[in-house]
Amino acid sequence: MSDVAIRVDKLSKRYRIGAYANRSDGRSPFLRAMVTPFKYLLSTLNEPSPNEIIWALKDVSFEVQPGEVVGIIGRNGAGKSTLLKILSRITEPTDGRALVNGRVGSLLEVGTGFHPELTGRENIYLNGAILGMRKTEIDRKFDEIVAFAEVGAFIDMPVKRYSSGMYVRLAFAVAAHLEPDMLLVDEVLAVGDLSFQQKCLNRIKGLTSSGMTILLVSHNMAAIQSSCNRVIFLDQGRIAAQGETLQVIQTYQSTLQQSRNGQRVDMLPEIKGSPSSESGISITGFEMMGEDGISRREFRFGESIRIRIDLYADQRIEHPMINFGIRRGDGVVITNFNNWYDNFKIDYIEGECSLEGWLPPLRLVPDFYEVHVLVWRWGGGHLVGEVTGSQPLAWATFGEFRITGLGLNSHDGVFQMPAQKWRFLRHDCIVEHNNIDSDSIYKAFDRAE
């Protein structure tokens, strides 16, 4: 057992459904409460029919070595959260076994492991005690945890009064700083804002270098690719693929595309950000289209892309700057496009509005990238938000898109732009080339394929 951090052997988890499906039977709540326990007891004496059973996990086996960062991916309902709950000892498996070597820090959903009536300070010490840490160890980490979570002014307030963002910030800070042997992280990082998500990813990378074992469940393929040594793809409770990160992600994307009777299914995640901000502006939709005009999230190297940003403003906002940005999986902002930088001034927005943009060919290294949209107020030749330190009027993240095909590699950086002019000099001639064909490198790779 000492040679592995986690060993999962033919793990299965079965749930029985339908036992409490019929609630509108006309009985009073009191009578129903009296009858339900006996109804449940009688139902357990009979073998359930197949349509009353769902297997959240079925014959799942894998090993995780100490210090590995393993991503768990799959569609909703694939069994990812159930797997982490079994590893965290929150629920018991139906069959098989899961052996965990060391103390586990879990961040499965907002509020897991916190007592709502206790303060932030008390919950830090409670979680540390659960992990088996001494008070002196927690004292040493306390200030660092509070600083990371950015809840210093509220640390002695009961956590039931925290916002969801404050809750998840403190929960992640506790799990990541109290030094468990392994950290299990579910898709809770999406609750935080952009800066906090990046802070969490940086912290995970720091924990990786320290030798901590991490299991990371996420729908963010850019974050998975930048953080994980390898990936496990769960599909309908079974392991569909596991191995090298990019290969498994590609298998996952191919499965999505082949579903629904062969119709293409691109990942179009829910808007995460400020769908109803105090400024009165909502980012209601976002779309990316290829050269064929079809909405999708996968593009060939050098392909021109058109974007559409839908907004709703319940009040008149003068001179907005609407920004579309691209980030790499490790959080590096690659480039931004917006109307003001291109001298396209919008007098105001009010009600339902849309902005469409035709982007130049994206010469990005084939990879997964995250996209985000921000709306700022422009004032006096500068961004008001940047000067005052305030938040943008609205912001949202929209998952990932992917660049595929032959093209640049990591040695070329993350972005390549054509030169405006070339000049070649030799003893017998001077040759100039203006306005280089921006599609030339794309066409060259296209011919190579």
Image (cartoon, grey):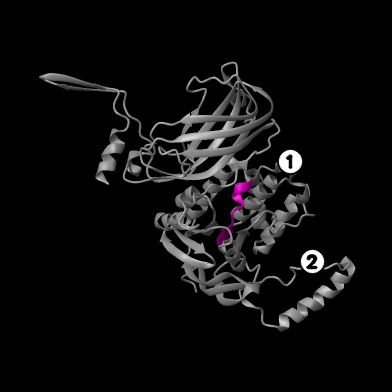
The extreme bottom residue here reads 45
> What residue appears at the point 36 percent right and 41 percent down from the top-left corner?
301
Magenta-colored stretch includes residue 361: no
> CA separation, marks 1 and 2?
45 Å
Using the rendered image of the protein, determine whether residue 65 is visible from the camera's viewpoint.
Answer: no
Q: Vertically, is 17 above or below 371?
A: below
Q: Residues within 10 Å of mark 2 (few under 14, many from 20)?
A: few
To which residue does mark 1 refer?
153
Residue that lies at the very extreme toward the front in this rendered image: 261
Q: Nearer the viewer, residue 26 or 91?
A: 26
Residue at 33% of width from left, 39% of height from top? 412
Q: Helix, strand or loop at disc 2? A: loop
Q: Which residues are magenta?
A: 180-191
Left or right, 333 with reference to 171:
left
Mark 1 crowd level (few <14, some 14–19, many ≥20, 10 Å Cα) = few
Residue 333 in the figure: left or right of residue 353: left
Which residue is nearer to you in this view: 61 or 346? 346
Estimate the x, y position of residue 249 in percent, counting from the top left: 44, 55
What residue occupies the far left of the structure in this picture? Answer: 428
The residue lying toward the viewer, choosing from 379 and 199, is: 379
Q: Are marks 1 and 2 in contact (CB under 8 Å)?
A: no
